[in-house]
Image: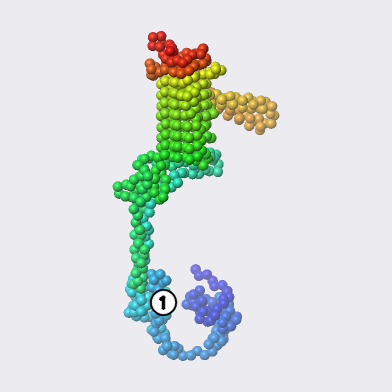
Amino acid sequence: MDRKPQKRIVQIENVEELLSLLEKDYGQNWHEKVSFRISKADPANMEVIIEPVHESHRESILKELSNVVEIIEPALSDLSDLEEKYPDPHIQVEISEDKMIASIFIVPGLKRVLPTFDELKEALKKSGVIYGINEDALRKIIDESKVFAHIPVASGKKPIYGSDASIEFLFPESGMIFEKIGEKDSVDMAALYKIFTCHEGDVLAVKVPIRESYDGIAVTGEIIKVEKAKDLNLQNFVGENTKLSEDGTKIIATCDGQPYVQNSKVCVRNVLLIDKDLGYDTGNIDFNATVIIRGNAEGPFKIKADGDISIMGVLGEIQVTCGGSLKVQGGIFGRGKGIIKVSKDLTAKFINESQIFCEGNIFVEYYIMNSVIICRGDITVKGRGVIAGGAVKTSGNVEAAELGSESGVRTEIAAGIDYENEKEIAQLERNLLEAMRSIMLLSEIESSARAKTTETKEIPKKEELMKILQKTAEKKKRIELEVRKIHETLKILKHNLQVKYSDTSRIRVRKICYPNVRIAIAGRKKLISDKIGPCDFFLNKNTGEISFL
C-alpha cells in the first residue's frame, strides 16, 4: 500500500533536477500524486514546495513552471542543432587505480542511443584494455540499454602475495613461564615464574612452509610483478642438544632440560644455572635435569630437579626434591622447616635443624646437629665429625668422631634399619604432630566460643557463635579420627620392623660417645650411660645384643 505523499520543501538548482527528483521519489506518473510550487525563483537556487496533488491547482503549477522556464531559458531553440552535434553515443572507458577493473560509461546520443558491440570493443582497445574482457557484459549493456552507469566489463588477474617460510617455536623463547593470577587468587610470589622443560625426543620447533607468490595481470595486459617468497633451511636454527628431523621440518630435543633460543638457534640447557641467590625473580625451581645455584637457597621456595642439585652457598628452610645427588658447599640450616628428599648421595659442609630422606650415602664435613635423618646408604661425618641431638638412622653404617655432647643432649643413632619403614614412620610422626597442634588450636577456639556464647545475650550474635561452635566441633572430630588412625598405623609399623643388613651394619666412633646417646642396630637398642670411645658398635650374633670394641 502506497504511503500518502507529504508536503515538503526542497532546494534545487534547475528544473531538470526537479524533474529527476520527482521521478525518483514518485515515479514517472509523479504528476498524478503531487504538485509543486516554486517559492523562490533564482536561476542558481530554486526553492520548491512539493505537496499532494489535491492541495494545489494544476493551472497554478503550469504558470509557475512557465515562469521558471522563462527565467532559466527564455526561448527554447530547436533540438535539431543538438541532434546534429551529438547524434551518436559517447563511450567512456575507466580503469581502476590498481588496473584490475575496466568499466564503461555510456552517454546516449540524441539520434542513436546505444553503441554497437564492436564499438565497445574498439573503445576498450583504444584505452589499452586487452585482458580479461567480459564480452557477455558488453552484450548486456546493449541488450538492457545500460546508460549513465559505470558497468565493469574487464577484470585483471590479481597477484597473490605469498609468505616466506618461517619457524614456529613450541616453547617460550626465554625458557620461562609467567603464571597468570586471578584477582581473587592468593599470590604465592615464589610460584609466579616457572621453568619450561622438555624431554628427549620432544619437538621444540616446526617449519611453517613457504606460501608461493604469483604475478598478476592488469586489464591493460601488464604483468604485475610480485616478490617471490623465500624458503629457509631449518638446519640453521639447530643449536646445542637439538637435532633436525629426517624430513627437515622439525627441531627435536636430544636430552631432557630447558629449551631456549640463543642467537636464533634452538638449544636445550641440560644444566639450569642460577648465577645468584635464589629469589622471587627465579621463583620455585622445577627442572627435569641438573640445577646449579651459585649462591644461597633460602626463603619460602621449593626446588625440584630430576637430576643433580649443586648449591654453592647455604641451603635454608627450603623444600628440596632431588632426583640425583645433592651437594651443598655452604651447609644446610633447615630451621626445623624444610624437608629434603634425595634419590642418590648427599654432600654438605654441615647439617643443622633439618629433616632429610636420602636414598644414597651422606657425607658431611663438620657436623650434624638437631636433625632427623633417614638414610639408605652410609652416613659419614669427617673433620670435627660431631653428631649431636635429633635422630640419625641408616640402613648402612654410621661413622663420626663424636656422638652426643658433654651436656648429655639426647641423641639417637641407628644402623641396619628398614629404610622404607623408618621413612614412613618419620613422615607419619610429622603429620601426627601437625594434627595434634591443630586439635589444640581448635580446642582453644571452642572454649573461647563457649564462654562468649554464655556471656552474650543478643540472639543474632549468639546464633553466630553457635554456628562457629558447630563448625569447630565437626572439624575437631575429623582431625581426632585422623590422629587415631595415624597413631594406630605408627604402632603397626613399629611392631612390624623388618631388619635389613643387620649382620654388617656398624656405628663407628673415632673419638668419643657421650652419655644419653641411644644406639640402635637392627632393632636392638642400647642407652650409653658412660663416655666410650674410640669404638665400633655392632650386633653380637652370639648374644643378640649390641656390643662395642
- Provide the residue designation for mark 1: 105
331 is higher (above) or lower (below) than 536: below
User: Disc 1 marks which amino acid?
Assistant: Phe
Asked whether 256 or 430 is in front, the reply is 256
**Residue drawn where x is 39% and y is 47% of the image:** 266
Taking the view exactly as shown, the residue that stands out farthest to the left is 246
Residue 495 seen: no
Badge 1 element: strand
**Residue drawn where x is 42% and y is 37% of the image:** 290
**Residue drawn where x is 37% and y is 47% of the image:** 239
**Residue drawn where x is 45% and y is 15% of the image:** 535
Residue 71 seen: yes
Taking the view exactly as shown, the residue that stands out farthest to the top is 543
Q: How many marks?
A: 1
Asked whether 479 or 19 is in front, the reply is 479
Asked whether 33 or 382 is in front, the reply is 382
